[in-house]
Structures are given as C-alpha cells and as structure tokens.
Image (spheres, grey):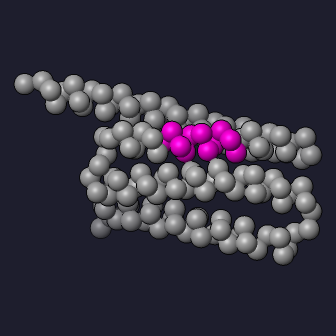
Amino acid sequence: MWNHSKSLVLTAWWIRAALVLWLGIAVGLPFFLREPAILVLFYLIFVPVLAALYGLDKMLRNIRQGVVFAAVNVSCLRLVSWACFFAAVFSLAAACLWPMLVLAAGGIGFLGLFVRVIKNMLAEAISLKQENDLTI
C-alpha cells in the first residue's frame, strides 16, 4: 500500500535520477553538439538547475528526518526559487537567438514565483508554530 514514507523515497530517487541525468548531459553534450551558443546557454542554466536540485534534495532529507517547520527548509525553498529566476533570465536572454525560449522562460519564472509563494507560506507557518509553542 502506498504511504507517505514511500512517497518521500520515490521523490528522493527522482531528484537523484534528475541530478545524475543532468550531470551526464553536461559531460556528454560537448561531444554531440558543436554549436557554441547552445553550449553556453546550457552551461549558464546548468548551475541554477544544480542549485535547485540540491535545495530540493536537502529539504527532502530534512522532511525524512522529521524537520518540517524549520528555517532551513525556508532557505532551501528560497534557493530553489532564486535558481528558477536565474534560469528564467538566462532563457529570456537566449530568446534573442531562439524566440521559442520566451515560453520556457515564462514557465520557469512562474515556477520560481510559485516556489516563492510556498516559501512565504512555510515561513508564516513556522512563525505561527513558534507562537503556538509559547502559548500555555
């Protein structure tokens, strides 16, 4: 039967699989692609994606350890949102060469905004929890 613990394990595997795939693409791409502009764009976006995957993995490890309403998780979400915003800016800049990247930049930017809202909600929940813990 499916439960919360299995869901966390599955999510951790997906994050790690994405990390391995992303690193594999980074190593192999120069051998298969010779266009410098695409390589530069990929490596500009590579760093924010790695940062986002790191933030997600760290937050998931915290949740698995029972650390949910904590400032460290707010920091992880902040990292993920900024990574999305940087990737969106790089994609938007690359849209000068490939106009279809405007759609990708918009989607990535929206994702960053969505994560930012979740971060603010978690920060408020932590504040309410701390206030509630001090109440007798």
Identify the residue shown where x is 72% and y is 52%: 45
Tell me if 36 is positioned left or right of 43 in this view. right
Q: Residue 124 at x, y = what percent? A: 36, 27
Q: Is residue 104 above or below residue 133?
A: below
Tell me if 100 is positioned left or right of 105 in this view. right
Identify the residue shown where x is 64% and y is 50%: 48
Q: Quadrant of the C terminus?
A: top left
Q: 7 or 84: which is nearer to us? A: 84
Q: Quadrant of the N terminus?
A: bottom left
Farthest residue, direction left: 136
Say if residue 107 shows up in the picture.
Answer: no
Identify the residue shown where x is 46% and y is 45%: 76
Q: From the image, give the main secondary structure of the stretch colored magenta.
A: helix
Q: Quadrant of residue 88?
A: top right
Q: Residue 13 at x, y = what percent? A: 47, 68
Q: Residue 85 at x, y = what percent? A: 65, 38
Q: 111 or 65: which is nearer to us? A: 65
Identify the residue shown where x is 72% and y is 67%: 26
Residue 33 covered by magenta stretch: no
Report the span colored magenta: 77-87
Tell me if 42 is positioned left or right of 59 in this view. right
Q: Residue 32 at x, y = what percent? A: 85, 74
Q: Is residue 9 above or below residue 77?
A: below
Say if residue 16 shows up in the picture.
Answer: yes
Q: Exactly how many numbered labels are in the figure?
A: 0
Q: Is residue 61 above or below residue 17?
A: above
